Image (spheres, rainbow, N blue to C red):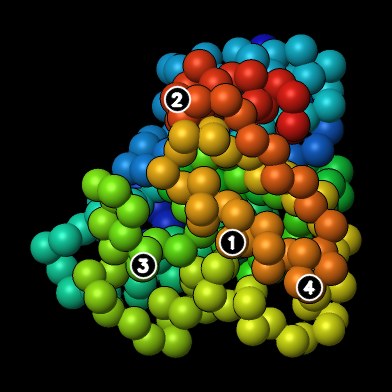
Amino acid sequence: MKREYHKWYSHNLEKDMELLIFGYAGAKVLFFPPRMGRFYDYENWKVIEALKEKINNGKLQVFCVDSVDLETFYNSFVDPGYRIHRHIQYEKYVLEEVLPLANLINTNTNVISAGCSLGAYHAVNVALRHPHFFCKVLGMSGRYDLTKSKGYFKDLLSGFHNDFVYFNMPNQYMKNLEDVNLINQIRNMDIVLTIGKEDSFLESNYKLSGIFNEKEIPHQLIEWNGEAHKAVFWRKMVDLYL
C-alpha cells in the first residue's frame, strides 16, 4: 500500500501539522481522527488495513488528518470562546491547506468526509457547512451537538453559547436552515450515519436524522448492535460504507 507522510507549518493554526496519505488514486477521503486522536491512529488501529483492497485498487485515497482537540473542545483550561475560535481556525486549516494539497495530489473530483467519534462530528460538520466540496460524508459513532451533556460526556463549551457555537453544531443550525441552494447542495451528498444501539450518542444521531427528514434530505441512519464505539467496529464500518 502506498503511504506518504507530510508535515508543514500551518499558517491558520500557527504550528506544524502532520498527516498521512494512503493510496494513489480514486475518491479522496478526508479522515478525521476520534476525540483527542492523532493522524496515525487509524493506521495503528488497523482501520486503514480494512480499506486495503479499495486503496490498492485505486478506488480510494485516504488523507488521515491530525486533530487539535486538546486545544479546542477538550481544553478546559481556556475560555470556551477561545475553544470555538480555535476550532474555526482548524476548519480553515482543513479547507485552505489540507484540501488544496489533496486536490494537487489527486485530480479526482470526488471528495468524501469521514470520521469516528469526535472525528464524525468534524466530518459531518464540515460537510454540512461546505457541501460544495464533498460528494459524501460518513459519520461513525458521532455526536452532533457538543453542547449537550450525555452520561459522562459533558458539554464541551461549558455552557457558553454564541453564533460561532451555533453555526458549528449540526443539530442546532440544520434545524433552522432555510437557504434553498445550500439545502440542495446537501441533498446532493451521500450521507451515512452509523451508530451503536447502546451508544451514548444514539439520541444525537436520531435528532440529526429527524432534521434531515424534515428537510427532505436523503440519508442513511444505520444502527449496530451494542455500543459499537471501538476500532474493531470501525474497521467493519469503513469496509461497508466507504
User: The residue tagged with tag 3: helix, strand or loop?
Assistant: loop
Residue at x-position 50% and y-position 69%: 169
Mark 1 is surrounded, within 10 Å at the Cα level, by few (under 14), some (14 to 19) or many (20 or more) other residues, namely some
Q: Which residue is mark 1?
A: 207
Q: CA distance from mark 4 to mark 3?
A: 23 Å
Q: Is residue 209 above or below residue 196?
A: below
Q: Which residue is mark 4?
A: 215
Q: Which residue is mark 3?
A: 147
- Sequence order check, earlier mark of 4 and 3: 3
- Sequence order check, earlier mark of 1 and 4: 1
Q: Nearer the viewer, residue 98 or 238?
A: 238
**Disc nearest the viewer among 2 and 4:** 4
In this rendering, would 91 be left or right of 150? right
Residue at x-position 76% and y-position 72%: 214
**Disc nearest the viewer among 1 and 3:** 1
Mark 3 is surrounded, within 10 Å at the Cα level, by few (under 14), some (14 to 19) or many (20 or more) other residues, namely many
Mark 2 is surrounded, within 10 Å at the Cα level, by few (under 14), some (14 to 19) or many (20 or more) other residues, namely few
Give the residue type at disc 2.
Lys
- Sequence order check, earlier mark of 2 and 4: 4
Residue at x-position 66% and y-position 27%: 238
Q: CA distance from mark 2 to mark 4?
A: 31 Å
- Sequence order check, earlier mark of 1 and 3: 3
Q: Which residue is mark 2?
A: 230
Give the residue type at disc 3.
Thr
Position of residue 68 measured from the top left corner of the image (x, y, whole percent): 35, 52
